[in-house]
Image: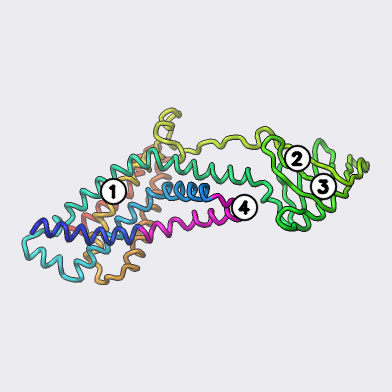
């Protein structure tokens, strides 16, 4: 009877878990999808880059997806057991409802242990890699910044305007202004092309135009040309490596820093998200036994509302931690939801 009960509960929970995981993953991945569209619009069609970006985006939000999945799937499972009176049947068979949670608690503990490793090492790396890909893509695709009838400041002091672009590479009526040391240099051309070279920078192959400079109130025409290659050199620090932000630092990198309140808050936050599946399992099952509808959309809605409340309390805990220099306030949502889950089960 016990083995049958366990396999039955685990099967039901597994189905709800997979369903909730897919829906929540999709909702949390919407921002990543928009980023992918942005990469495609900047003419980055490399499948390898897109796949890498998607993987890093997904890993960076995994610490949020797993706890909410536990909440929604547990709520859905126990609502169905309650509405179909299976809780009563199990109780009448001498099976305490709390025993139903036994295998699920083991599963949530294993998930929490995995999340500890993820949150301390893999998730911050994924966040950093994701931001790095965006920066590198934008750098490698400076040409994609050039738009029709749009002034673009590629580097400080240098503005490029193109009236029309034909066949994605032929530029019409080009205007380039370079302002440096109080002097304005201007290039105008009827036609041209643009290329990117890692060593030299942006190379404009211009035709039928002229170059002049304005210094103060004086105007000097310097050069009229039929064909001219203008090289826009990029500053040496233009592609300076991006620096780690605190949420992007692994636990090993944080240990090398001077540990202050912010570092302590970040570490505690990662542990809190790791232990949240256990708390949400208890809270979700308690809520589920009080509901009378098996609508999965309702369960997802409750999960979303509960998660938002949890995150808001966590933010309040962060504020109190900064003001009092006591990071124990970070655990306020874990404590409150744990108490509420216990009260729901007690009733």
**Distance of label 1 from label 3 (alpha carbons):** 67 Å
Read off the residue under disc 2.
232
Query: Tags 3 and 4 in contact by the CB under 8 Å rule?
Result: no
Q: Within the image, what quadrant is residue 345 found in?
A: bottom left
Q: Nearer the viewer, mark 3 or mark 2?
A: 3
Which residue is labeled 4 in the image?
42
Q: Residues within 10 Å of mark 4 (few under 14, many from 20)?
A: some
The prevailing secondary structure element of the residues shown in magenta is: helix
Residue wearing tag 3:
206
Residue 265 colored magenta?
A: no
- Which one is earlier in the sequence, the residue at label 1 or at label 3? 3
- CB under 8 Å between discs 1 and 4: no
| Spatial CA span between label 3 and label 2 | 13 Å
Q: Where residue 157 sits in the image (x, y, percent)?
A: 76, 42
State the CA–CA distance, disc 3 to disc 4: 23 Å
Q: Which residues are magenta?
A: 22-46
- Are there few (<14), some (14-19), or many (20+) residues within 10 Å of tag 2? some
């Amino acid at each position: 009877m016990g083995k049958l009960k366990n396999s039955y509960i685990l099967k039901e929970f597994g189905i709800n878990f997979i369903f909730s995981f897919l829906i929540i993953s999709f909702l949390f991945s919407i921002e990543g999808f928009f980023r992918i569209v942005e990469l495609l619009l900047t003419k980055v069609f490399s499948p390898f880059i897109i796949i890498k970006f998607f993987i890093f985006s997904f890993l960076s939000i995994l610490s949020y997806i797993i706890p909410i999945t536990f909440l929604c799937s547990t709520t859905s499972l126990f609502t169905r057991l309650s509405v179909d009176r299976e809780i009563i049947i199990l109780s009448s068979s001498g099976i305490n409802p709390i025993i139903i949670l036994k295998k699920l608690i083991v599963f949530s503990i294993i998930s929490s242990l995995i999340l500890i490793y993820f949150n301390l090492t893999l998730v911050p790396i994924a966040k950093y890699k994701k931001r790095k890909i965006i920066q590198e893509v934008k750098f490698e695709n400076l040409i994609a910044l050039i738009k029709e009838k749009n002034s673009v400041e590629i580097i400080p002091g240098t503005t490029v305007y193109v009236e029309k672009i034909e066949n994605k590479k032929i530029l019409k009526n080009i205007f380039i202004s370079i302002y440096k040391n109080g002097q304005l240099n201007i290039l105008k051309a009827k036609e041209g092309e643009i290329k990117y070279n890692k060593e030299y920078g942006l190379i404009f192959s211009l035709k039928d135009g002229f170059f002049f400079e304005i210094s103060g109130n004086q105007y000097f025409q310097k050069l009229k040309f039929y064909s001219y290659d203008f090289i826009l050199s990029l500053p040496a620090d233009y592609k300076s490596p991006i620096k780690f932000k605190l949420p992007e630092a692994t636990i090993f990198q944080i240990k090398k820093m001077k540990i202050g309140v912010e570092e302590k808050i970040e570490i505690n936050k990662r542990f809190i998200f790791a232990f949240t599946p256990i708390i949400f399992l208890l809270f979700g099952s308690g809520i589920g036994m009080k509901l009378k509808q098996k609508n999965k959309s309702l369960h997802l809605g409750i999960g979303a509302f509960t998660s938002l409340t949890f995150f808001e309390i966590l933010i309040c805990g962060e504020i109190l931690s900064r003001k009092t220099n006591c990071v124990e306030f970070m655990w306020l949502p874990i404590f409150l939801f744990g108490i509420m889950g216990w009260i729901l089960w007690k009733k």
